Amino acid sequence: MSSEETVWIFRDYLRCSGCRRCEIACSLHHEGKMWPEASRIRVFMLVPGVEIPHLCAQCHDYPCVSACPVDALSVSDETIAVLVDKDKCISCGKCIDACPGKIPFLHPGDNKAVICDLCGGDPECVKICQEARFDALVSLKERRGRENLNRQLFAQTPEQLTEDVAINIFGEKAEELI
Amino acid sequence: MPRGYAGKFLDIDLSKDKIKDTTFDDEILRNYVGGRGLAAKILWDRLGKKWEKVDPLGPENLFLALTGPLTAIHPGARICASGKSPQCNGIIGSTASAEFPSELKCAGYDGVIVSGKAKSPVYILVTDDKAEIMDAKHVWGKEAPETIKILTKEVRGLLEERNPNAGKFKDPGIIYCGPAGENRVRTAAVMMKISHAAGYGGYGAVMGSKNLKAIVAKGRKPLPDVASPGAVRLLWHEVDRQIMRRDRTWPGLWGTGYGGYTVGASSSSEPVRNWQDEWHDEKSFGGPKFDYRYWVKRYWSDFNCSGACMKLAVIKTGPYKGTFTDNPDYELEAYLGPNLGVFDPGECIYLSALVDYLGYSGINGPNTFAFAAELYQRGILTKDDLGFELKWGDVNAFEALARKIVKREGIGDVLAEGTYRAALKISEMKGVDVTKYAVHVKGVEIGAHGTRSGQDIRPAAYACSPQCGDHTSVVSDAYRDMGMVFLDSAVICSFVSGRGLLWDYYRAVTGWDTTQEEWNRTLGHRIIHIQRAALLLGGPDIVWDPAIHDDNPPRYYEPLPSGPYKGQTTDRKTVEEMKQEYYEAIGWDERGIPESEVLKKLGLEDVDKALDRLRK
C-alpha cells in the first residue's frame, strides 16, 4: 500500500458462502487462536442462506469515535481504521449505540470494544476469502484523504442487511422468513 | 486433557430435569475419539447389558450429539447424531454439517448426551459452560423455516438481554427435529439449517420420543487449544489449497447436484421408481437445468469449509413459487426425482424442500414413499387404503403421502415405521409378501447407489456394514473402510478430508501419536465390533440373523431392465464370497458373529460376554 492510498474492505453479501473462514483468519491474527466470537468480522446468518459478513465500514464521520466518553477510540493516520485503546475502554457500549450498523461488540474474553483495525492495511479476512475465490471480500484501494460517503451506507445492522439480501434471494417469500 | 477437545460433555436427564457435566478418560478418547466411535462406546457402556430390551423410542434410549477433536478445527465441521437406532436397533453414527458443532465446542462442550423424556416439549439451550432446559411448546409442530426463525430470534433476544452493552449477538447453532421426528416417524432426521440432515438411523424420531424439539448452542469461547498451533495453522491453509486446486466442477466442491442425471445415465445405479430400474437418460433432469433455473447461490458453505457443496435453490415462478432448499444434492435428486417417477427439476426441488421442512431423512423417507407407490402400481395398496391415487410422478399425491405419514393417519401410521417394518405389516394386512419390494438393509433404507451395474457400490458393501444401508460408510477390506469410521469419529466431512494430510492434522491437533495403521488395524475395528454386536443383539421388535440379513435387498438381484447394463445384476455367489472374506478380515466367525478371541485381544471382554447370548 502506498502512502497515497488506504484500503477499504468491500463486502458482497450475495457472494458470501458463509464458510466463516474469515472469522478464523481474523481471530488467528488478532487472538492467536481460532475464536469466531472474537473475530472483528462476524458472519450473521439470521435466515438460512442469507450470509452477512459484518465489519466496520470506516464511516467518514466516525460516530463511534466521537461517542466514546473516555477517548478510548481513535482513527489510525496510517490506515484510517478505528483503533481501540483497551486500557481506556470502560465497556459502556456507547460506541455500539452510536454505530449506525451496531457493528462493534464487546470482546467475549476481556469485555472491551472490538472494531476492525484493517490488520494494519493488509486484511487477513480478505486474503482467506480470495484464496477460496469467493470474492465476497475485496480490498479496495482509495486515494488518501478523499471523503467517501458511500462507506457509511454499509454500516447497517445485520437485520437490515438480512432483509435486503433476503428480498434479493427469495423475493416475496423473504417477508415470511425474516 | 488431550487437545482439540473442549473438555467435557453435557449429560442431561430430561425425565428428572437433571443437567450435569461428564468427562471421559484420555484413554477412552484416544481409542474412540468422538462422534461415531465414542457414541458406540457410550451406548455400549450404558445400555449394553440390557440392549435387546431397550426401546429406541423409549425414555431409556439415549440421544447423542457428539463432535470430535477435529470438528471445527479442520475444514468441514460436522455433528454426529447417534443412539440406539429405531431403524436397525443397532448403533449408527449419522453426521451432518452446519454451525451447531462449532458453537457447541466454543461453549465448552464436546457433545450432548440426552436420556429420559421431558414431560412436555422442550429445547436445550447451551451457552458458555452452561445448559438450560427451555419450553418448546411454541415450536412443537412447526416446520423447519418457522422453527429456525423462532428459535434464532428468541435466543438472540435472550442473549442480548443477558449481556447488556455487548452488542449484536450472532445466530446460534441449532439442531432440531421436524414434525416427522416429533411423531416418531422412523425415517426422521436430525436437522440443521433447513436442509442439513443427519439422516441415517432415524435419530430425529429419538429426539421426538424424548419431547426434545431442539438443541440450541451459542458459544463465546475460543475453539479448543491444539497441541501444535503452528502446524495446525499451516495444515489449515494447506487443506484449503488442496480443495482449491481441484476443479470447481468436481462434485465434492460443486456439490453433488449434477448427479441426478449422471449417476443414472452413466453408472446405472440410481433408483428409478423404487429401484425397478437404475438407469434413465432424462436430460431434462440434468445439472444445468437445476443450476441455471433455480440456483440463486452457487457457493453455500458450512463453518470452516470453502468446499461449498451446497447451492441455494429457490423457485421463483409457477405453482411452487417461494420454495427454497439446498441443491438438492444427488441423494435427494434421486430419491425425490426418478425414484418417484419425477423428472422435472422444479418438482424435485419442491418435494425435496417438503421433506426437509417436515424433517424426514431425504433418503430414508422417500424410499418409503416409493415403496408405497410400487405397491399402488401393483394393486396391493389401493385408493381406499391411501385416500388418493398414488401414481408415479404425481407431485401432489406424494406431498399428500408425506403429510399423511407425518401425521400417522391411516396407512400413514404403518408407513411411518419405515420401509421394512411397513413391509412386514402390509404383508400381514394384505396376505401377500411385499418385503421383496422393500429396498433396505437391516431396516435402513439404502442410499441412492445400487450394486447391479457393478459401476458403483461393491456387491457385499452394504450387506456387512454395521451402518446398514448407509452409502457413506460401506465396507471393503476391513482396512481401507476404517477411513470413514475415523472421519465419523473425528467428525469431519469426507469431501474435504485433506488428501494425505489427515493424520498429520489429527496428531497436530490432539498431540497423540495415533497412526493410520493403528487405526485401520485396531482402533477402528473396536468400534465396528461394538456396532456389530449391538446390531446383532438388536430388539426389541426385530432381531437380525446374519445368515439371512447380511445381504442386499431382493430387488438388487433382479436383472436391470434397461440401459447399457441391461440384464446385469448382483451376483449372489460374489456376495457370499465377499461376505466370508470380510468376516475373516474383520474377525467374525462364519456366521458373522465377532470371534471371542478377537474381541478379547482388543480388550472387549464385555462385548464378547454379551455375544454369548447369541452364540448359544
Image (spheres, helix red, strand yellow):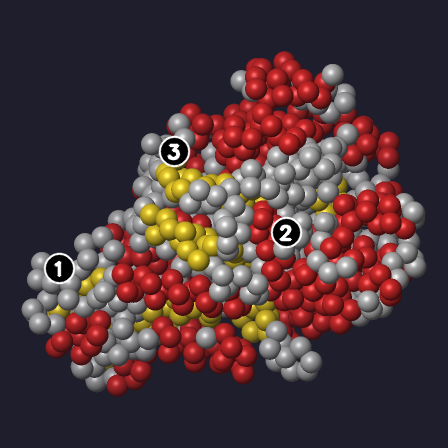
Tell me the crowding category of disc 1: few under 14, some 14 to 19, or many 20 or more residues within 10 angstroms, Cα based: some
For marks 1 and 2, give the CA distance: 52 Å
Residue at mark 3 shares a chain with residue at mark 1 = no
Which residue is depicted at the point 92% across and 59% down?
A: B379
Residue at mark 1 shares a chain with residue at mark 2 = no
Q: Which residue is mark 1?
A: A86
Dot 3 amino acid type: Thr
Q: Is residue A9 visible?
A: yes
For marks 3 and 1, give the CA distance: 36 Å
Dot 2 amino acid type: Arg
> What mark, if any, has residue B236 been given in the picture?
none
Report in which chain the residue with disc 3 lies: B
Dot 1 amino acid type: Lys
Tell me the crowding category of disc 2: few under 14, some 14 to 19, or many 20 or more residues within 10 angstroms, Cα based: many
Residue B178: horizontal and vertical position, in percent? 58, 59
Does B443 sit above or below residue B287? above
Q: Is residue B258 left or right of residue B129?
A: right
Front-lying residue, A161 or B509: A161
Q: Which residue is mark 2?
A: B184
Which residue is depicted at the point 70% across and 58% down?
A: B408
Q: Residue furthest front?
A: B119
> What mark, if any, has residue B23 been given in the picture?
3
